[in-house]
Image (cartoon, rainbow, N blue to C red):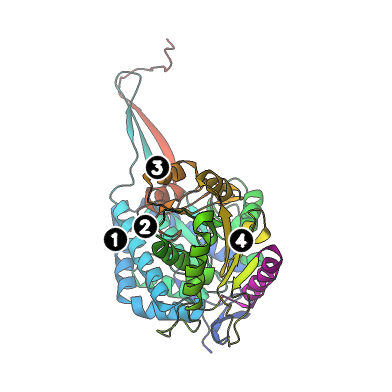
């Protein structure tokens, strides 16, 4: 079995613990390799490497930093199919989705490379004569990047690309469920010629590695994607540093009585059961007008029963496995809760096959305050909630602690605009599913979904920079603002 290493100061190295853990293929439960079970000492070494590299990297002109990103994008494109197949083995989602994951990484490195010739500040008039006033974007310093397993290439790229082009050195902790994909990304970054110490990767557990990155005083910024509870812990324990949090979701698709039902069903299936429901943007609630609830249910159940479970590398497969045994058991627990809170119309049990598979599941007659309608399951479980009008639909949609993605299917422009105006979410789609992010647009949510940070687009630059305000007084004398003589 192949053993993989940490990457610190431009070298591949073993952990000081001399211990490893396995990454498993969730479709076969077989090991894909051994990875370093790192210690606090490994994290400290990575931080020292990043600190050493930081001054020279931040002093490199941004257009020159961008050249590395263009090369990373090119190498990702060159290795796209190999990376996608490897990711399917490690994460489980079907090949067409892992190809999309790789493409998103390609796109974000290319987009952020373009920001190397922008990194815009802004100028504004001074209230005084012969005085110039403007702002600059400056690097934060050494940043910690902690990423999940469900988009094991795209999400690290969302963070690493802007962090690099903005001039930050990085300590990167990937999920222990997908360390091989993270290692492959770092290998490509190394091949692109990134200077030693600019990016460092340390694999291992949350207690030894993640906690140390979050609390270490030399880490000036944290970018984290994961659970709400972990996000709360980070907020309480990180200390005074810049923190970006992208947390959970309980996303709804509203289907009004004038909707194109076939289009809506296609969007619901993709949103609810794509990636086996393991997306923070996954659709887990359908809020449907009472006049079409029965028709939508029939079409939706029929389409769901056509979905084929299996290894994501097989062309016939529509839905892959859950990431691990714990995820399978959690989904089963919520399915049992759902039997008490609604009426099961499809699925509801573990699939009788090797691997961590679970049948796509639909409950109807679910109340808005039911647990399966309120709590993030992160599995292929969908709740149908019936409403009488748009006002009730929006009220139910907003009646959760999260606020990431949302959608409405309607042919009425007034209803669409009211939904855009009134739904409490960072993202709203009209006549499309709740998922899908374009790298030049900001991504993130409100309420318990995050702390106001947005990733991708220009907001991704803001996440990894500080604003410096600059005044240049060329009057030749001391001028005092606010009219003070």
Distance from label 2 to label 3 (Cα)? 29 Å
Residue drawn at 42 percent across, 84 percent down: 316
Q: In front: mark 2 or mark 1?
A: 2
Badge 4: few (under 14), some or many (20 or more) residues near its Cα, within 10 Å? many
Mark nearer the N terminus (4 vs 1):
1
Mark nearer the N terminus (3 vs 1):
1
Residue drawn at 51 percent across, 87 percent down: 2
Q: Quadrant of residue 159?
A: bottom left
**Quick check: marks 3 and 4 in contact, CB under 8 Å?**
no
Residue stretch in magenta: 322-342
Q: Quadrant of residue 138?
A: top left
On residue 67, which mark appears?
1
Badge 3: few (under 14), some or many (20 or more) residues near its Cα, within 10 Å? few
The question of residue 178 being in magenta is answered with no
The question of residue 332 being in magenta is answered with yes
**Quick check: marks 3 and 1 in contact, CB under 8 Å?**
no
Residue drawn at 50 percent across, 84 percent down: 310
Task: Check disc 3 and report the residue beneath it.
Answer: 414
Q: Single out the residue that lies furthest toward the top.
A: 485
Instruction: Point out residue 223 in the picture as x, y percentages from the top left corner.
Output: 52, 55
SS for callout 3: helix
On residue 439, which mark appears?
2
Distance from label 3 to label 4 (Cα)? 31 Å
Badge 1: few (under 14), some or many (20 or more) residues near its Cα, within 10 Å? some
Is residue 342 depicted above or below 313 in this figure? above
Left or right: 225 with respect to 375?
left
| Foreground residue among 263 and 47 | 263
Q: In front: mark 2 or mark 3?
A: 3
Task: Check disc 4 and report the residue beneath it.
Answer: 376
Instruction: Point out residue 164 in the picture as x, y percentages from the top left corner.
Output: 40, 57
Distance from label 2 to label 1 (Cα)? 19 Å
Mark nearer the N terminus (4 vs 2):
4
């Amino acid at each position: 079995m192949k053993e993989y290493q940490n990457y610190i100061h431009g070298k591949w190295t073993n952990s000081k613990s001399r211990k490893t853990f396995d990454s498993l293929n969730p479709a076969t439960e077989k090991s894909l390799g051994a990875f370093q079970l790192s210690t606090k000492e490994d994290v400290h070494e990575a931080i020292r490497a990043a600190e050493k590299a930081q001054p020279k990297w931040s002093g490199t002109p941004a257009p020159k930093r961008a050249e590395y990103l263009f090369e990373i994008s090119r190498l990702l494109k060159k290795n796209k199919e190999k990376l996608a197949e490897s990711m399917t083995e490690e994460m489980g989602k079907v090949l067409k989705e892992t190809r999309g994951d790789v493409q998103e990484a390609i796109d974000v490195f290319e987009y952020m490379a373009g920001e190397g010739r922008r990194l815009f500040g802004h100028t504004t008039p001074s209230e005084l004569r012969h005085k110039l006033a403007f702002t600059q974007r400056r690097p934060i310093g050494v940043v910690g990047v902690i990423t999940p397993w469900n988009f094991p290439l795209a999400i690290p790229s969302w963070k690493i690309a802007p962090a690099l082009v903005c001039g930050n050195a990085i300590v990167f902790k990937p999920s222990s469920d997908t360390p091989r994909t993270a290692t492959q990304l770092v290998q490509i970054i190394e091949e692109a010629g990134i200077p030693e110490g600019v990016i460092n990767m340390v694999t291992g557990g949350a207690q030894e590695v993640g906690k140390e990155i979050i609390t270490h005083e030399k880490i000036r910024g944290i970018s984290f994607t994961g659970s709400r509870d972990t996000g709360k812990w980070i907020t309480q324990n990180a200390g005074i540093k810049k923190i970006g949090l992208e947390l959970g979701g309980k996303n709804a698709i509203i289907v009004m009585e004038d909707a194109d039902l076939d289009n809506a069903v296609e969007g619901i299936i993709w949103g609810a059961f794509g990636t086996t429901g393991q997306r923070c943007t996954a659709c887990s609630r359908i809020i449907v007008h009472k006049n079409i609830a029965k028709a939508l249910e029939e079409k939706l159940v029929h389409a769901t029963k056509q979905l084929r479970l299996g290894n994501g590398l097989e062309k016939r497969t529509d839905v892959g496995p859950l990431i691990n045994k714990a995820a399978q058991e959690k989904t089963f627990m919520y399915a049992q809760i759902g039997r008490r809170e609604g009426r099961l119309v499809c699925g509801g049990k573990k699939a009788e096959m090797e691997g961590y598979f679970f049948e796509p599941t639909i409950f109807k007659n679910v109340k808005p305050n039911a647990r399966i309608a309120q709590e993030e399951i992160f599995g292929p479980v969908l709740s149908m909630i019936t409403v009488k009008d748009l006002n009730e639909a929006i009220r139910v949609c907003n009646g959760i602690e999260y606020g990431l993605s949302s959608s409405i299917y309607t042919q009425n422009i007034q209803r669409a605009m009211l939904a855009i105006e009134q739904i409490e979410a960072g993202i709203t789609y009209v006549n499309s599913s709740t998922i899908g992010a374009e790298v030049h647009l900001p991504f993130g949510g409100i309420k318990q979904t995050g702390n106001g940070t947005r990733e991708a687009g220009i907001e991704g630059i803001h996440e990894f920079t500080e604003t410096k305000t600059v005044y240049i007084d060329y009057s030749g004398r001391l001028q005092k603002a606010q009219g003070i003589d």
